[in-house]
Amino acid sequence: ASGAPASVRVGGTANYTVDVDNAGPNDAAPASLALVFDAVIAPVVTAPAGWSCAAPVQTATTTTVTCTLASFASGGSGSFTVSVPVGAALGGQTLTLAAAITSQYTDPNAANNTATASVAVRAIVDLGVA
């Protein structure tokens, strides 16, 4: 997972990319990707062909989007993009995305099933002296 730009001002947009793949040797049926942010936000997710993403679910401190695919073919890959409008409440914080992919089948290399990416949010001030 990656976040860009490394920092963004309040009022801007933080962009994240999450790449997924299935190294096989079997299809993953079904596959599920959880995108969890450490803040209450309104993410816009663009998923690869065939994937379906549910509406964001918010708690007091997180936002989760779950995307599913009926069968993730062995050797398959895809790239998700997530855009997050950055509101004033996030000023001075770091917005972190944690991504995790799962399937009902055992994965012999579970170490590569999660990733995180962060974007720093810069607060804006308009100081003046008269």
Image (tube, grey):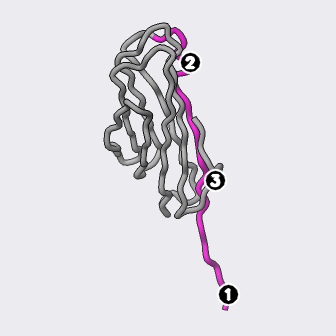
Q: Which residue is mark 2?
A: 111
| The magenta segment | 107-130
Mark 1 or mark 3, which is nearer to you?
Answer: 3
Q: CA distance from mark 2 to mark 1?
A: 54 Å
**Other residues around mark 3 within 10 Å, as few (<14) / some (14–19) / many (≥20):** some
Residue occupying the point 50% across, 41% down: 81
Q: Amino acid at mark 2?
A: Ala
Q: Are marks 2 and 1 in contact (CB under 8 Å)?
A: no
Residue, x 40% and y 52% (percent of image)?
A: 42
> Which of the labelled discs sits on residue 21, or is there none?
none
Disc 1 secondary structure class = loop
Residue drawn at point x = 54 percent, y = 43 percent: 16
Q: Is residue 112 magenta-colored?
A: yes
Q: Is residue 15 left or right of residue 66?
A: right
- Pick whichever of labels 1 and 3 is earlier in the sequence: 3
Provide the secondary structure element on which disc 2 rests: helix
Residue positioned most to the right: 129
Sort mark 1 into few (<14), some (14-19) or many (20+) by Cα contacts within 10 Å.
few
Residue 2 belongs to the span the image colors magenta:
no
